[in-house]
Image (spheres, helix red, strand yellow):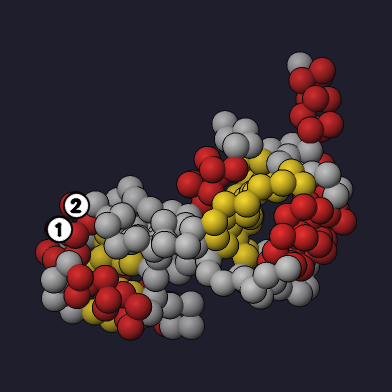
């Protein structure tokens, strides 16, 4: 048990957690959580009383060495995020890297992550895809969108409800108004929504409503680029 466990947690519906994940969280000496208030709700639901500590982007640089040493001393530590798999657009990478460098065993459990159901729901090719996560909010955002104009693979973005319309406007400008887009909102929750259409259609839909919840945007790849690659083969 003396190792770092990366434990995925539900992205919405509390039933979306594995039996093994619950067992590991109960048996661990310490659970590191992105937000202890958010995670406490899940832990109470499954009657998990393991000691809980904060581990987030504002303190992880200061704590990873100590946590790795704690595991080397014999403790088992489980890392969780507010939702989904830690290290996927959430804290986790620095701790995993530090543990590997110090010879600490790391084990990542399979489980929930938001982009997989969003990708499958979109109906776009999923044999190859490009996960972009959150784009830079300001500096570098336009540059990255320009770089993606020739991307032939399906593209996946995470976005906040406050910047969704802006992202869709940028998709229309950089990829063309007829490029197909799928927006998944509130996945696994009561008001889950999957809306598909051209950039123009999807932009009109979300511009006319109040947007709430966690959002995944899936964009069809550049088909011209894909056809050219096939011709080269």
Residue drawn where x is 48% and y is 47% of the image? 117
- Which residue is rendered at x = 14% and y = 58% of the image? 23
- Check disc 1 and report the residue beneath it: 23
Residue at image point 19% right, 59% down: 22
Circles 1 and 2: CB atoms closer than 8 Å: yes
> Which quadrant holds residue 11?
bottom left
| Residue 79 position in % (x across, y down) | 31, 66
Q: Which residue is mark 2?
A: 20
Question: x, y (%) of residue 18?
Answer: 24, 52
| Residue 178 appears in view | yes
Please give the label number shown on residue 40. Answer: none
26 is higher (above) or lower (below) than 145: below
Q: How crowded is the residue under tag 2: few (<14 C-alpha within 10 Å), some, or many (20+)?
A: few
Q: Residues within 10 Å of mark 1 (few under 14, many from 20)?
A: few
x%, y% of residue 50? Answer: 16, 74
Residue 107 makes an appearance in the image:
no
């Amino acid at each position: 048990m003396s190792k770092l466990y990366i434990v995925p947690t539900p992205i919405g519906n509390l039933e979306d957690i594995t039996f093994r994940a619950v067992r590991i969280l109960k048996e661990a000496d310490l659970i590191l959580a992105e937000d202890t208030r958010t995670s406490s709700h899940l832990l109470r639901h499954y009657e998990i009383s393991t000691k809980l500590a904060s581990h987030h982007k504002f303190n992880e640089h200061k704590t990873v060495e100590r946590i790795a040493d704690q595991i080397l001393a014999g403790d088992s530590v489980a890392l969780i995020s507010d939702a989904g798999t830690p290290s996927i657009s959430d804290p986790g990478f620095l701790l995993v890297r530090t543990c590997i460098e110090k010879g600490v065993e790391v084990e990542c459990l399979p489980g929930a992550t938001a982009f997989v159901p969003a990708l499958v729901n979109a109906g776009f090719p999923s044999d190859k895809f490009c996960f972009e996560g959150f784009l830079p909010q300001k500096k570098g955002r336009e540059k990255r969108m320009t770089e993606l104009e020739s991307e032939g693979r399906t593209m996946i973005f995470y976005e906040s409800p406050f910047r969704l319309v802006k992202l869709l406007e940028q998709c229309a400008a950089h990829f063309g108004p007829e490029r197909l887009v799928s927006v998944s909102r509130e996945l696994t929750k009561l008001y889950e929504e999957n809306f598909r259409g051209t950039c123009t259609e999807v932009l009109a839909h979300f511009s006319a409503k109040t947007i709430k919840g966690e959002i995944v945007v899936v964009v069809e790849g550049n088909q011209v680029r894909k056809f050219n690659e096939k011709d080269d083969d």
